[in-house]
Amino acid sequence: MTKKLTRRDFLKIATGATVASGLAPVARRIALEPFVQPPEEALPGQATWFASTCRQCPAGCGIVVRTINGRAKKLEGNPLHPLNRGKLCARGQSGLQVLYNPDRLKNAVRQSGGRGSRQFEPLYWPQALDLLEEKITTLASPERLAFLGGLMPDHLYQIASRLLESLGASPPVIFDLHSALEGRAAASRLSELFFGEPQLPVYDLARADVVLSFGANLFETWMSPVAQNVAFGDMRSSASGRGLFVQFEPRLSTTAASADEWVPVRPGAEGLVALAIGRIIIEERLGHVGSHRDHAVMYQDVDVREMSAASQVPVETLRRLAVAFANADHAVSIPGGYLAGQRNGLASMLAVQALNLVVAQVGRVGGVFLSDPGPTASLQNKPAVHNFEEVLGLIERMQAGEVDLLFVYGANPVFELPAASGFAEAITRVPYVISFSPFVDETAVRSDLILPDHVYLESWGYQVPSPGADRPVVSSQQPVVRPLYDTRSTADVLLGLAARLEGPSQALPWADEAAYLEETVSELNGSSLGAYNARTPSGFWALWRQYGGWWSEKEIRREPELTDIRSKPLPVSEPRFDGDPQSYPFILYPYPSVALSDGRGANQPWLQETPDPMSTVQWGAWVEVNPETAQALGLNDNDVVRVESQHGVLEAPVVVYPGIRPDVVAIPVGQGHLDYGRFAQAASGSNPLALLAPLTDADTGGLAWGATRVRLAPAGRKQVLARLESLDGEGRESLD
Amino acid sequence: MNRWITILILLIVAAALAGILITRMQVWAAPPQPIAFSHLTHVQAGVQCLFCHSSPLRADIASLPSVQKCMGCHAMVATDKPEVQVLAGYWERKEPIPWNRVNYQPEFVYFSHRAHLASGLNCEICHGDVGSMTVAQPVVKMDMGWCLDCHLKQPPEKTARLSDCLTCHK
């Protein structure tokens, strides 16, 4: 349709354009809003730095936050903090986008159209507390109340535990996917078996000469990645040389890419490799430890050739690594999260930890130490992650209609648990669900009431980091800005609730969480270890916040005491998988995304924008397939593939990746959100948890997240992934 | 046809000129403010610049007074004036006053009041005789030419640093 432009129209348009271009600069007005009441310590326009604790993952790094005019502007690592020593990872840096996230709930809400309706009706806090009180007092029995927690500050865990105890309910169940992927519960069980206490080990990377890492993604998400990165830097720049770092993992992760050698072991057979290395050291009397007689019993059932065949690692490689490991002055072997994600998890981890025994590296420089449990008795009471079996127990109770009221804090079980575990269905059987999430995530959508907590930059708290540093540490957390919205600290909500109830008001007499914290923290004042002391409790409280925590002035490493683990043969356990190898030929490796971790970072655009270090994909999820496999299936980069297990199906584009075994396919965890805000929902991708079999390692009860077999089929279409590096092969870098 | 093209070109030129003119006009136009605050009245009452704009000796910015500071006097002084009552309204609602910026530096410029005051400049040198204005208005177009005009007139040992790009565009 063409229309001839008349002279009159032409003049109209031209005049309009003239006026509009003239008006443009006038429309630019910048508002300056001074404080109503200025904070006393703030000089306008001058930065104030507050020390606090990062809560983007369970590591507990110290941060300092630059604030100007009451607004947080930049996060950095706290240079005084013994754990991260001034460094901070990308996820930590991105914390500002949790604070300023446009999808945060701005007040307490009730779903007016029923659960899942996404129709939120604002609720006044006093009303919300009335509702809470009513729900608790009308419970038929306190046992019908359940609390499911994830990552939470230590003080909130203590307050919640006390509240539940005084009500007569069972203690909180703590589970989140991040902890499951790093095998936290299994690592704790391993420590109990080896050292007789549940504290997590601290591996002294910095002073080690040879490091064998079995499925531990030390520099991505596992345990304390910033501290481990710093230590790795020290190891590489040590006076005695660069050292040797070997990574055993079916996939070339970012950590494996930093290693000197990557050994693509058959999935689940890492423990067998460790057994073989141990056996070789004993048999051939390698190293400088002297007699190996004490350790012989452990390896009596091990045959090196069988282990080599089962793990598909040649005997020569095993021998070479055994010699290097045993001959090193300081060697350490690390059982990682991927091991814990198998059905023979504990057996593998035992085998790996035993290597440290064989070369006498327990409690020695460059070897294994134990985390400090916390400097005082009350600080030692910290949330211990439960295993998957206990979560299945809760799901069973929910399904059987034995739970009338469910609290969810800091976890997103609908997204984070394998779909086949049935949580999404079980939650519908619970008459009333209350979420404390600051965001409307998949679980919050299925609740009746959302009582949003402050985000961590607005909150109080503390954390005894586990694994710890080279000395006793407590990280303190304080609000660096005034809460932006009408949210309320969950600890205060629980204390407010307790005050209305007869029993709990005795157990929780504190007016608010700050009072509770001040009391708990003041026990540290006067300690002979501390880097500082004060004459008054309030003086100590001020220093506690200024330093960003409390720690010992000197290095104090805890040497573990061995149990009688040496007197028994180590179990030899072959991996077992869900699905038969004929119809499901590939083993699925759902690995934690270095940016999004278990998906909790998916609502932060900086993290979505961060390219995956290996595939350089941004804003999406993909399936990594070995070139051989891809060729056999007729797959190319960006071809959408259908991944099917016995429990679910998903479709995602392929990344042809030479750094993966041909019998393994890998999918990063973290994408595929159906709720959790605009950025999480905008990214393409599916959640691999949909495929997982809800299996456990029988020894630990931990989720065997790496034990599912899948099959692949081309979906017959393409979906081009956004990648920082092109694959066009025309002068630019590509992966092949 | 040629006539149309000529007209088009003329109109584009006119639009550009009008745009430039209106942009320049903004320099002399006082932006509307939520409260018709008079600098003149306050200066006549003997209030110094630094009493309200308290930061420039210590910080990069001059700062605007907090509502609390305004109310420090106006809880008692001139409470019958309608504009003071508007101010009291903000205070009661605990709302910040959304002032419109009068003097403007773009985001890619690092400007520090402290450095300028430390080298002996007065407020009036850049901001004009604000004390005789009712509503504050800009007196100079604070662009790079204007900055350099002064920076290049400094003693020779300073001009190299003062005309370095990275001094202001960090």
Image: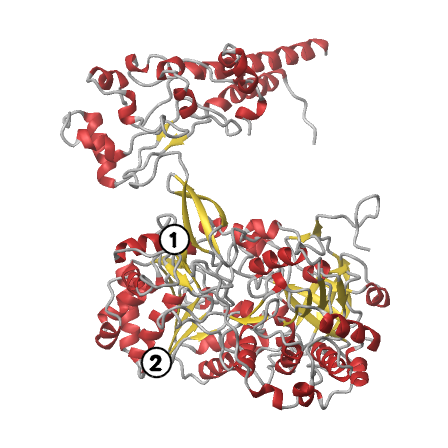
The total number of labels drawn is 2
Q: Nearer the viewer, residue A508 or B12?
A: A508
Image coordinates of residue A693 in percent, x first then y, are 63, 78
Dot 2 amino acid type: Ala
Badge 1 density bin: few <14, some 14–19, many ≥20, Cα 10 Å: some
- Tell me, yes or no, whether the two marked residues, 1 and 2, touch with CB atoms within 8 Å: no
Q: Is residue B126 visible?
A: yes
Q: In the shown orientation, is residue A95 left or right of residue B12?
A: left
Q: Which residue is mark 2?
A: A169
Q: Secondary structure at mark 2?
A: loop
Q: Say few, some or many: other residues with alpha carbon within 10 Å of mark 2 (under 14 / 14 to 19 / 20 or more).
A: some
Question: Mark 1 is on which residue type?
Answer: Glu
User: Can you say whether A91 is above or below A177 in the image?
Assistant: above
Mark 1 sits on what residue? A458
Whether residue B29 is visible to the viewer of this picture, yes or no, is no
Write down the quadrant of residue B4 in the picture: top right
- In the image, A473 versus B51, the foreground residue is A473
Q: Residue at x 38, y 38 (%)?
A: A69
Query: What is the x, y in percent for residue A3?
Result: 67, 26
Towards the viewer: B134 or B12: B134
